[in-house]
Image: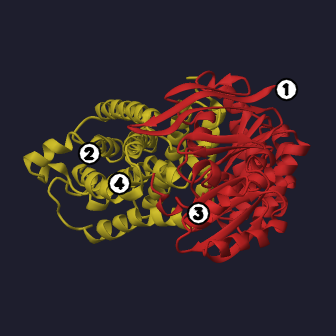
Chain colours: A yellow, B red
Amino acid sequence: MKAIQGIAIYVLWMREIKRLLHAKSRLMGTLLMPLFFLAFLGMGLKRSNIPGVPAGMGYFVFLTPGILGMSILFSSTFAGLSVIWDREFGFLKEIMVAPISRISIVLGRIVGGMTTTLFQALVILTISLLMGFRPRGWIMLLPAILLMILISVTFIGMGLIFASNMRDTQGFNLIMNFVVFPLFFLSGAMFPLESYPKWAKTLSRLDPLTYGIDGLRAALIGKSELPLLLNLGILSGCALLSVMIGAWFFEKSEYI
Amino acid sequence: MNMAIRVDHLVKKYDKNTAVDRISFNVFEGELFGLLGPNGAGKTTIINILATLIHPTSGYAEVAGIPVTGDRDALRHRIGIVFQEPALDVRLTGMDNLQFHAMMYGLAKQERKERIAQVLELVNLEPKANLLVEKYSGGMKRRLEIARGLIQHPKVLFLDEPTLGLDAQTRRHIWDYIRKLNREKQITIILTTHYLEEADFLCDRVAIIDKGRIAAMDTPSDLKSILGGDMVHIKIQGEASAYLDLLAKSDWIKSIKQHHDQLTLTMEHADKRIPELMNLARQAVAGVQSVNLSKPSLEDVFLHFTGRNIREDESTDGFQ
């Protein structure tokens, strides 16, 4: 049966929410790193002149959208990869033997991962507001949230692609170090891309997070390389492609 | 009687390795059927095929009248399964695990509440329902999984090594639950085990699986009677061929099997024959280290049909 079953998606979504609520320390852990980045880098370099950051904007304001993107990148990839823990701990079999379609399982995981990720990003955004960050218009939070959702879906899909091709949890660190960190540094989350060498700039054009963070900057602080709508369009394509490839790999992977 | 499970010339191959080799058997409705065999014999593979988790390479299998390659979701609705390895979300409570299961099987809210209360009572887990599963003991996890497998009121319940790794007392409890389910709820149960006493104690019929094939299949008592009466195990020292010749000439001995330095003889009224056996040993100048008399067990049956002890393969398992 190929149908999308709402109840199955709801169950898998609810599972993520409950797990998040049961593990408050884990939630704190995932929030702390981006907040440290924001606090120490943002505050420490507040008065420095960084090429590419408009004079008068301040590095903290420039950095905030980047840290939002970073937080979403890490927790979304993690959410997609968590299939390997479900396999390791056996719970995947319980899901696989239930009378629900595979596409519902994939969608449930994406919606669940997206919710927890978005929640974390909104907490970081709120704290950045308390620290003095101001978006250029409150209405611009709406496209910003849409961008966050698209970044999240893109990287949950990417996590699923990797998880479906891994037999155990061994490859996790490898993916973190050789995929996630390069994606983060290439995206221009920390520094304006214009100070990067040409090859790095070219590579960064292949990184979906680049468009996510550039889009967030376009929406929130009005300083971006590409217009907001173009970023939204490219990122939507990335999200769709990544979900489709992720679902395809998940369907064909051996569950047990 | 109707069939709960029909398996006909089922084959599952992994690359060149044949895990299940042309197996055929039927399970009647309401029966408690056991697949007995050492680790790696193919038991779990059979269960995974019947539960629609993996595709057979060839052959036919159906559960509750539905072919495993047919309407899988309909089949999944009719079965419950307890896997060999725990398949619980330990970061959720026992209640959450049951709730999610009930929802995935499409039960409405009121029905969920009733059935969860029922299954929790059955396995005596009501007081622990709201505890995170990571705080459960091994036995409690097993009971929770059995409870979970029953929520959808399955026609057939699969139990893959239901007491693996549990202590003797907990194992007894689990056996009681399994019996209760089979007798009182009339659920067809098919279980795999490499514990002979488990198959002997629980099962109406047992199929002995060895290297992907069925070596023998019958009720535990009929399997044991194939061996013909009581068994005498004689541990010998040194050369025994003269002794074996003398034993072979005694027509009251039904069968003689040699396994390393151990002779296994079957006969009626073995207790009265032991002095005679000792006399023969003296005549043949054979050294006897020990003599053991036993009523036949499934262990003996396994040895009889496969030529090996069931535990001989244990040191090499765990890598699949």
Residue at (56% x, 38% y) in the render: A108
Which subunit holds the residue at mark 1? Answer: B
Q: Earlier in the sequence, mark 4 or mark 3?
A: 3
Q: Is residue B182 above or below residue B68?
A: below
**At numbered mark 4, what does the secondary structure look like: helix, strand or loop?**
helix
Of the 4 image quadrants, the one containing the N terminus of chain B is: top right
Say which amino acid is labelled 2: Lys
B203 or A183: nearer the viewer: B203
Q: B237 left or right of A251?
A: right
Residue at (52% x, 50% y) in the render: B40
What residue is pinned by disc 1?
A: B1
B126 or B37: nearer the viewer: B37
What residue is pinned by disc 3?
A: A23
**What percent of the width, then of the height, locates residue B281?**
66, 72
Q: Earlier in the sequence, mark 4 or mark 2?
A: 4
Say which amino acid is labelled 1: Met
Q: Which mark is residue A70?
A: 4
**What percent of the width, then of the height, locates residue B246?**
65, 62
Q: Quadrant of residue A238?
A: top left
B142 or B187: nearer the viewer: B187
**What percent of the width, then of the height, locates residue B126?**
84, 59
The residue mark sitting in front, 1 or 4, is: 1
Q: Which mark is residue A223?
A: 2
**At numbered mark 2, what does the secondary structure look like: helix, strand or loop?**
loop
Measured in 3D between alpha carbons, the distance from the residue under mark 4 to the one under mark 3, in whole angstroms, is 22 Å
Q: Residue furthest front?
A: B283
Measured in 3D between alpha carbons, the distance from the residue under mark 3 to the one under mark 1, in whole angstroms, is 51 Å
